[in-house]
């Protein structure tokens, strides 16, 4: 499917119902001609009504990601484009229905992963939808098309159905359309990203709803909301104020504390799994819990963009499940493509029992859980044996992290009353107790407080901000050793420096084996606490990162940033120099014939590159053409003279 012209990426807004004869189905889609294939519509319908063994009543908000399969596509897994779905699902008891429950959902389908924005929009319009019905779909779509275009790295306050929602626009927006790879400006011949298996080994694997039929005519009329927003927009939410300077990529708005509460001490393990491209399954009784955890997991390594496959909520009926299960059964998840799945169906733990790692939230009902946990209460943040020196049994069911063997099957571990991480990978990093001690505990009176304006409780916002800042800093510090590859290194190609020189010839080529050797000289005092383990573990961590799907896209993007910055400087130099000065050596002597020929080649290459851009700088192109003509004339004169 082609992306929509809507600057916010909204493809369609749909309603999904459960029909006893056909199962999940799209009741209505707006616009009617939305570019969704039959296969994609089926995925949206299946994913919008989550599977659950519980029958909790009320509204659930969650998100999913599915392939955008074209109508002509025979193989749904071949499509490289994805869509996001943001859902408000309502379930209520209704004895008049065959299943005994009313189940319906409203879904916003987009190309842009603006989680915080569409969650807040649905929080506003969801209750209205169950009063008005499907006419609201058109009104909401029309409302969104009236918004100004998103401005990266700003906080925007947008009108919705007579009120406002605030949203911090990420500085980098990742859109899941088919990849359009930027052409590499430097030679890869001298570079090597190959990592030996020995480098990746840590040598330490032994560690551990009935809808209201009343339709007020004042809400929607002629496909538009009738309510008018107040003239003065409200102030941004408290959580937006805290995060306004830190939202770099799409999912950084998803709270780390709120998504992994009870697993705080495991966040460093999850960061390791994310940065090294390990596959993780998140199993939870709620679609909300698993989808938020998956998105939070992918954002842990910001500012590095996550380049694995991720499905915040995944179902058995998804077309990709069969192929995924086949690869799983064939390989037993050895060298399995980097994939993060969220599910509410415990069957996944059996069907994909060799999945490399799993975060399992308790499926036990409150009545099934012990009134008093069998172990002593731990300090806030779960500072257990791995951080406070106390002895804890490795099989203690309350232990948040548990190391499991490669051959262990996920469905052999009994349900637990606390969330836990089942990890097959050895621990290469360590939790930072200083950060855990910074987390704020809720006051008893506000622990379950729900903010009327949709804001989260202040202690949750503060903890989310503390953890987000820490892990962003951790990733930044982790990336520091790569900095020598993003600056002027040496003129190893012996090219004459001119305003037309290819700056990439002056950049250090990356060779993984040499980089890993250089880590031996890295002072541990310059590393953040989480990375102060052993040399073997540190080397293994970097080797696995280099071998992950995240590294080369990050490395290329970072190097291209540097190339662009240097090119901007050279662009300014070319604007202030004439051809005579161009053909003058740094010593003051005039270039010889060979030097002029090299300069001509440089000018021609730069001119060709400028003419291939989507937006042409005609004035600068004309300047370069004059330089080329004058240098060509000088070459002709020198050739005659010789």
Image (cartoon, rainbow, N blue to C red):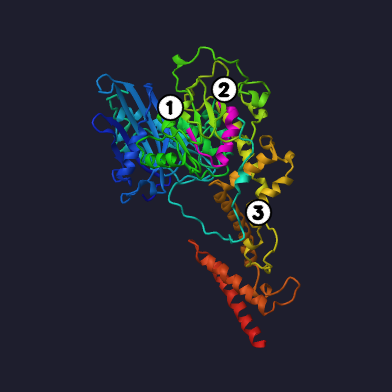
The x and y percentages for residue 225 are 34, 35
**Residue 163, visible in the rendered structure:** no
- Quick one: 326 or 636, which is closer to the camera? 326
Q: Residue at x 57, y 61 (%)?
A: 185
Which disc number belongs to residue 395?
2
Circle 1 sits on which residue? 286
Queried whether the magenta region covers residue 614, the answer comes back as no
Quadrant in the picture for the C terminus? bottom right
Whole-Å distance between the Cαs marked 1 and 2? 26 Å
Question: What element does badge 2 sit on?
Answer: loop
Question: What element does badge 1 sit on?
Answer: loop
From which residue to which does the magenta span run? 262-281
The x and y percentages for residue 317 are 34, 36
- Give the left or right position of residue 565, taking residue 51 as reference: right
Which disc number belongs to residue 485?
3
Rendered image quadrant of residue 531: top right
The relative height of residue 287 versus residue 113 in the rendered view (above or below) is above
Queried whether the magenta region covers residue 264, the answer comes back as yes
Q: Residue at x 25, y 23 (%)?
A: 98
- Of marks 3 and 2, which one's residue comes earlier in the chain? 2
């Amino acid at each position: 499917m082609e992306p929509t012209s809507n600057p916010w990426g909204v493809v369609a807004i749909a309603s999904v119902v459960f029909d006893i004869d056909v199962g999940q189905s799209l009741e209505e889609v707006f616009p009617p001609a939305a570019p969704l294939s039959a296969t994609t519509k089926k995925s949206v319908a299946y994913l919008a009504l989550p599977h659950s063994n519980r029958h909790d009543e009320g509204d659930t908000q969650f998100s999913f990601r599915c392939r955008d399969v074209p109508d002509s596509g025979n193989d749904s897994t071949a499509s490289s484009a994805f869509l996001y779905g943001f859902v408000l699902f309502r379930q209520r008891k209704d004895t008049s229905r065959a299943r005994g429950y009313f189940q319906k959902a409203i879904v916003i389908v987009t190309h842009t992963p603006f989680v915080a924005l569409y969650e807040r929009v649905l929080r506003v319009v969801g209750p209205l939808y169950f009063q008005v019905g499907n006419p609201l779909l058109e009104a909401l779509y029309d409302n969104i098309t009236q918004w100004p275009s998103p401005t990266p790295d700003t906080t925007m306050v947008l009108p919705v159905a007579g009120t406002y929602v605030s949203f911090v626009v990420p500085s980098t927006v990742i859109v899941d359309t088919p990849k359009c790879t930027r052409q590499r400006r430097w030679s890869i011949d001298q570079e090597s990203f190959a990592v030996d298996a020995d480098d990746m080994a840590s040598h330490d694997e032994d560690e551990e709803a009935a809808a209201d039929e009343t339709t007020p005519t004042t809400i929607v009329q002629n496909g538009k909301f009738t309510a008018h927003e107040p003239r003065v927009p409200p102030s941004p939410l408290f959580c937006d104020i805290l995060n306004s300077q830190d939202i770099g990529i799409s999912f950084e708005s998803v709270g780390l504390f709120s998504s992994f509460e009870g697993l705080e001490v495991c966040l460093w393990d999850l960061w390791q799994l994310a940065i090294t491209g390990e596959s993780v399954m998140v199993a939870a009784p709620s679609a909300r819990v698993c989808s938020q955890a998956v998105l939070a997991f992918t954002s842990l390594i910001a500012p590095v963009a996550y380049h694995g496959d991720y499905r915040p909520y995944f179902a058995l009926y998804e077309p990709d499940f069969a192929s995924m299960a086949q690869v799983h059964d064939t390989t037993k998840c050895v060298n399995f493509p980097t994939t993060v799945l969220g599910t509410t169906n415990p069957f996944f733990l059996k069907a994909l029992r060799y999945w490399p790692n799993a975060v399992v939230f308790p499926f036990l009902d409150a009545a099934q859980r012990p009134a008093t946990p069998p172990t002593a209460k731990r300090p806030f943040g779960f500072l257990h044996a791995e951080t406070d020196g106390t002895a804890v049994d490795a099989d203690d069911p309350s232990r948040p992290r548990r190391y499991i063997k490669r051959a262990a099957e996920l469905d052999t571990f009994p349900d637990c009353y606390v969330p836990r991480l089942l990890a097959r990978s050895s621990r290469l990093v360590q939790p930072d107790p200083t950060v855990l001690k910074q987390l704020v505990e809720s006051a008893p009176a506000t622990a379950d407080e729900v903010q009327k304006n949709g804001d989260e409780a202040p202690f949750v916002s503060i903890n989310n901000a503390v953890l987000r800042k820490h892990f962003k800093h951790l990733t930044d510090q982790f990336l520091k050793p790569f900095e020598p590859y993003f600056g002027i290194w040496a003129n190893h190609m012996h090219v004459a420096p001119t305003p037309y020189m290819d700056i990439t010839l002056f950049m250090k080529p990356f060779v993984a084996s040499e980089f890993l050797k250089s880590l031996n000289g890295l002072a541990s005092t310059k590393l953040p606490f989480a990375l102060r383990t052993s040399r073997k573990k540190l080397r293994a961590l970097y080797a696995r990162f280099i071998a992950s799907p995240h590294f080369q896209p990050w490395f290329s993007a970072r190097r291209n940033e540097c190339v662009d910055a240097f090119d901007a400087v050279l662009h300014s130099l070319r604007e202030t120099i004439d051809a005579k000065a161009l053909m003058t050596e740094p010593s003051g002597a005039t270039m010889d014939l060979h030097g002029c020929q090299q300069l001509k080649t440089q000018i021609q290459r730069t001119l060709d590159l400028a003419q291939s851009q989507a937006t042409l700088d005609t004035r600068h192109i004309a300047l370069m053409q004059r330089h080329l003509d004058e240098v060509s004339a000088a070459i002709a004169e020198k050739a005659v003279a010789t």
